[in-house]
Image (cartoon, coloured by chain):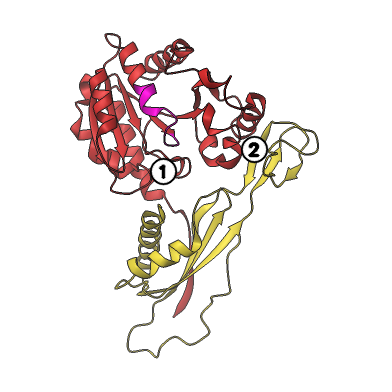
């Protein structure tokens, strides 16, 4: 299982960007993971709770946006979801295809909080629903 | 106050950066490096053994072997004549750029022409972790079955060469070569392929010629 180093990498990226933004707390992370990337959400969440402990991202919520695999036929332009045993274009049978979507593996954005300890705790107005799209 | 900070950074960017450092070190020493990946038992170590033996006197070969435990594979490569270094990953299912970075100083790169990195036997993870080698070589084998490109597309997409080992078993094992090839073609159009048997030696020459040519043109 390689979710541990992956999770550590996510934490490193999030903390670096939070620091650059002058924030002292990370509350939410928005991950974009393609279907072709081999990663198990639950496993990342499990490790997250351990590796983020004691950091400004402790307790932050992980949001996974899963992108289905999509192939693009270079001959007829058809976009299609690859089947289990059929990878070639279902329309023209061409094998000249490329992966149009599904290998994403990135941290899209984070929600941070830069209020200091003297301020009241953040209310529910945290912008958690605003997710930047691809 | 709460705010959303755009990041848009590849999760494995740190690994990618270190892989680039490895590549720089490898190239500075004038070495050509390949990363051999396969499922357990496909014949990675056998291919390396045969390669090292056949190229003895032609190329100086160094080898870094990644395994969860034991140094059996590195021992086999060393017995065949390579300068071999063992990396035990301690349960990790793939080599990553950090492990290669730690292993490189244990080899005298200046005295090597070709560096062969043997990844952990696994058809899922290794493709996701760049090491800094020049080319990824995927070893498939007949008994694994012809559906592997379809089941492990990530690995087949990430390879620059596919070696199909154990072709001596074709008469005994159901294996639809055309079905297998169609899968590879879609995932990785035009990827160079070698059909061979490490046991009988059939087909090895084409592989060895390709490898020597790569060393010549990439150094």
Residue position for label 2: A98
Residue B148 magenta-highlighted = no
In the structure shown, which secondary structural element does the residue marked by tag 1 occupy?
A: loop
**The chain coloured yellow in the image:** A
Identify the secondary structure beneath mark 2: strand
Chain letter for mark 2, please: A
Does residue B34 appear in this view? no
Q: Which residues are magenta?
A: B38-48
Crowding near the residue tagged with mark 1, few <14, some 14–19, many ≥20 C-alpha atoms within 10 Å: some
Please, is residue A5 above or below residue B171 in the view?
A: below
- The reply, left or right, for residue B17 in relation to residue B181 is left
On whether residue B39 falls in the magenta region, the answer is: yes
| Pick the front one: B161 or B92 | B92
Whole-percent x, y for residue A98 in the image? 64, 37
Quarter of the rendering occupied by the N terminus of chain B: bottom left
At a point 68% along the width and 38% down the height, the residue shown is: A87
Where is residue B160 drawn, in percent x and y? Answer: 49, 28
Extreme-right residue of the structure:
A91
Whether A131 is drawn above or below B177: the answer is below
On screen, residue B21 above or below B56? below
Residue B61 visible in the current orientation: yes
Quadrant hosting residue A95: top right
Q: Position of residue A99 (x, y in %)?
A: 63, 41
The chain in red: B
Label 2 neighbourhood size at 10 Å, few (<14), some (14-19), many (20+)? some
Q: Mark 1 highlights which residue? A: B129
Name the residue at 55% across, 51% down: A104
Q: Residue A114: percent from the left, percent from the top?
A: 39, 77
């Amino acid at each position: 299982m390689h979710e541990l180093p992956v999770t550590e990498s996510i934490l490193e990226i999030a903390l670096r960007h939070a620091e650059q933004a002058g924030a002292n707390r990370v509350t939410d992370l928005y991950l974009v993971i393609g279907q072709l990337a081999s990663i198990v959400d639950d496993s990342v969440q499990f490790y997250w709770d351990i590796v983020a402990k004691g950091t400004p991202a402790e307790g932050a919520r992980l949001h996974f946006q899963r992108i289905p695999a999509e192939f693009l036929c270079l001959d007829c332009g058809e976009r299609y979801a690859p089947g289990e045993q059929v990878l070639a274009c279902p329309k023209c049978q061409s094998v000249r295809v490329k992966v149009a979507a599904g290998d994403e593996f990135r941290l899209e954005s984070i929600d941070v909080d830069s209020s200091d300890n003297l301020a009241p705790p953040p209310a529910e107005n945290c912008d958690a629903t605003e997710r930047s799209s691809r | 106050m709460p705010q959303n900070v755009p990041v848009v950074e590849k999760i494995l960017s740190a690994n990618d950066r270190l892989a680039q450092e490895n590549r720089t070190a490898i190239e500075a020493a004038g070495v050509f490096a390949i990363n051999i990946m396969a499922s357990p038992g496909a014949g990675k170590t056998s291919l390396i053994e045969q390669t090292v033996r056949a190229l003895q006197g032609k190329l100086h070969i160094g080898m870094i072997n990644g395994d969860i435990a034991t140094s059996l594979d590195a021992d086999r490569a060393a017995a065949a004549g390579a300068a071999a270094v063992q990396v035990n990953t301690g349960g990790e299912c793939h080599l990553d750029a950090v492990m290669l970075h730690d292993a490189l100083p244990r080899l005298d790169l200046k005295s090597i022409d070709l560096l062969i990195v043997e990844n952990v036997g696994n058809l899922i993870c290794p493709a996701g972790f760049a090491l800094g080698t020049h080319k990824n070589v995927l070893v498939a084998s007949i008994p694994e079955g012809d559906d592997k490109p379809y089941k492990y597309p990530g690995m087949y997409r990430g390879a620059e060469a596919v070696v199909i080992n154990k072709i001596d078993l074709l008469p005994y094992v159901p294996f639809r070569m055309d079905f297998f090839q169609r899968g590879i073609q879609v995932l990785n159009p035009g990827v160079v392929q070698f059909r061979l048997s490490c046991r009988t030696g059939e087909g090895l020459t084409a592989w060895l010629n390709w490898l020597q040519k790569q060393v010549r043109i990439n150094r």
